[in-house]
Image (cartoon, rainbow, N blue to C red):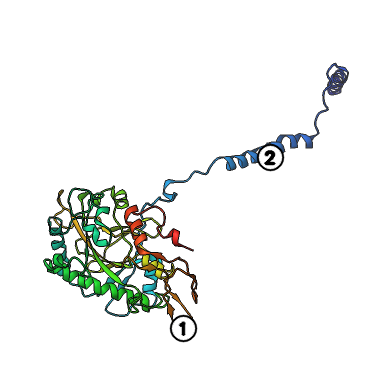
Amino acid sequence: MASSSTATASASSSADDTDRHHGLVPSPPPPTPSNHSLSNSFPSDADASFSRLLHQLLVPPALSQPSLPRRRSLIEPYPPVVPFDHAPESGLLLSAASDFGFFHLSGHGVDGDLAASALDESESLFCSHSISVNNMASVGFHNEDFDDGDGDSIDRSGRDRVLVLDASGNGEGEVLSSLPALREFGECLQKLGFAVVEMLSSMEEGFCGNPFQKEIYKPRCLLWVTSHGKDTNTARFGPQMAKSKCYPYVVGLQYEMRWWRKPYRAIGDSGELITITPVPDSILVTLGDIAQVWSNGKFKKVRSRPQPTSVPYDGGDDSSCISLTLLLTLQLDCIISPLMPSSEECSFDDDGGDNVGDNGRRKFHGFCLEEYAWRVYNERLPVKEPLLRYRI
């Protein structure tokens, strides 16, 4: 019985094969077990791998929010505190000058009460009519360049009010004589300014000699008195600083009052907005464009005068913030050029030539301070590097 069934199945299979071979549409031979296994597994595995590869290439990786880099609009450097009453650590002053362009000066001997009294007297200047019309002529420009026709002695460009006094005693003797604290405070800052230049000249890789001692350059000391409005500590501070007046200088000095707890704002060497955390009762020293040229580009500079961001007195809506900055600068007829070393002594070449010394070729052309000061003062902190046109 089993043999009969087997024979019947074989006959049926044979008949089916005959029909497939002789039918109208031929059929492919059945796959071998090995081919059948490959056709079911290998192509599908390859397709899956290829799909995964395409997915990795085409789909961006999902990043978690904390891992994304934060976009920072302000740079918050931490400059060193340089002692004045004793020798600083080796390399401390050089690092402050070359890496930051500013530093805090401690142990300077300027009394904090004197600084506060000078600020109080400065505030009265903005209500005084004893200053000649258009006080901005103190920087050396002509009165008609700034006269707006209202007879006001205060430069009211932007939101800040600015007064400039010649602390060297040229032209503002009567004004300062009626303000004893301000006069004494200005004299103290003058002495510190010259001492800082000597510090920068004495250290290794600093200025090539002190140009003031050699009487190559004639100094000027300007007291820059600014009344900052109540908008100083708002989000509009950046645009406000872009409208602030600026003037070329060697070093700037500003007493850091105890009540100024919030950071200063300033424009850095590359045009960035920087914040400077105050150190109470220290002197904030900034290096200016002239210092950068004298160092042949080794020192960084601060393009603007640092401005406080908090109202120091009662904090009321109508209060203002008075800041005092002494700018140690030069006479307008000076030619500014790098202080380059020679084989025997420092060469103070002010003719704009290419003086080559031990530190390599000069990086700046010589230029007239008056022309440069006019451009810097009127362009109001330009986006472009103001010294760019003088670089070699």
Q: Nearer the viewer, residue 81 or 342?
A: 342
User: Could you say which is closer to the camera, residue 325 or residue 376?
Assistant: 376
Total numbered circles: 2
Q: Which mark is residue 259?
A: none
Amino acid residing under circle 1: Glu
Q: Position of residue 7 (x, y in %)?
A: 87, 21
Q: Is residue 267 left or right of residue 39?
A: left
Residue under pointer 1 = 344
Q: Mark 1–mark 2 contact, CB under 8 Å? A: no
Indicate the quadrant containing the N terminus: top left, top right, bottom left or bottom right: top right
User: Three-letter amino acid code at disc 2?
Assistant: Ala
Give the mark nearest the N terminus, 1 or 2: 2
**Kind of element beneath mark 2:** helix
Q: Is residue 6 above or below residue 256?
A: above
Instruction: Tell me if residue 383 comes above or below residue 26 in the rendering.
Output: below
* Residue that label 2 marks: 46
**At numbered mark 1, what does the secondary structure look like: helix, strand or loop?**
loop
Q: CA distance from mark 1 to mark 2?
A: 78 Å
User: Crowding at label 1, few (<14), some or many (≥20) Cα neighbours within 10 Å?
Assistant: few
Q: Residues within 10 Å of mark 2 (few under 14, many from 20)?
A: few
Q: Is residue 346 visible?
A: yes
Q: Position of residue 294 (x, y in %)?
A: 40, 70
Snapshot quadrant of residue 105: bottom left
Q: Can you name the residue that lies furthest to the top here?
A: 24
